[in-house]
Image (cartoon, rainbow, N blue to C red):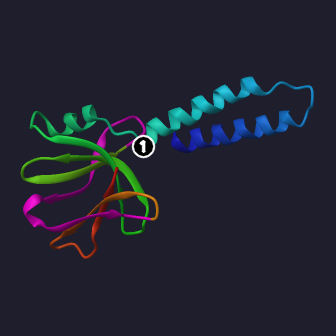
Amino acid sequence: MGKNLKLLIALNFGVIVYFMSFKSMIVWPLFLPLFILTAVWYVTVFVVTEKMVRKVRGDEPFYFSKCQMINEKNEMVYGALAITENEIVFYKRKSLKGGVTIGWTTFTASIESYRLEKVDDYHPGVTLSVSGENHPVKICS
């Protein structure tokens, strides 16, 4: 469905550009579906809510924070952190219909150090050094 939404967004944009070539045509009403499709695509691909995480974790209390993690390929993965007394878990969106999956997890005892710094060219965040990991874990909000 995500690819279909991207296709609909591209088609709608193409229709807007085509109709803008006619001088007497009013194209502003065509922007509304473009904005709606873009919003639906964003929500179905990137949004992870506390309710989704609570459904997976159960009744265990945790601290919730929406954030992004930068993976080994320097790609930004959108999701959320759930932090408890013993572990840190990064959840990412599983499917377009909802649900989350674990993207990364570690125990708090295995964190060797952390640094507050820019994790990429634009985003300030936290860089974690975790024992057993060959690369630092970069998280930004």
Rendered view: 118 above or below 63:
below
Rendered view: 24 above or below 61:
above
> 137 and 124: which one is in front?
124
Q: Residue at x 21, y 34 (%)?
A: 55
- When asked about the image quadrant of residue 11, the answer is top right
Horizontal arrangement in the rendering, residue 28 relative to residue 113 (left or right): right
> 121 and 27: which one is in front?
121
- When asked about the image quadrant of residue 48, the answer is top left
Residue range highlighted in magenta: 95-120
Check disc 1 and report its element: helix, strand or loop.
helix
Rendered view: 140 above or below 35:
below
Q: Amino acid at mark 1?
A: Phe
Horizontal arrangement in the rendering, residue 6 relative to residue 26 (left or right): left
Whether 128 is among the magenta residues is no
Percent coordinates x, y for residue 3 in the rendering: 56, 45
Percent coordinates x, y for residue 134 in the rendering: 25, 76
Whether 103 is among the magenta residues is yes
Residue of label 1: 46
Q: Residue at x 57, y 36 (%)?
A: 38
Rendered view: 124 above or below 10:
below
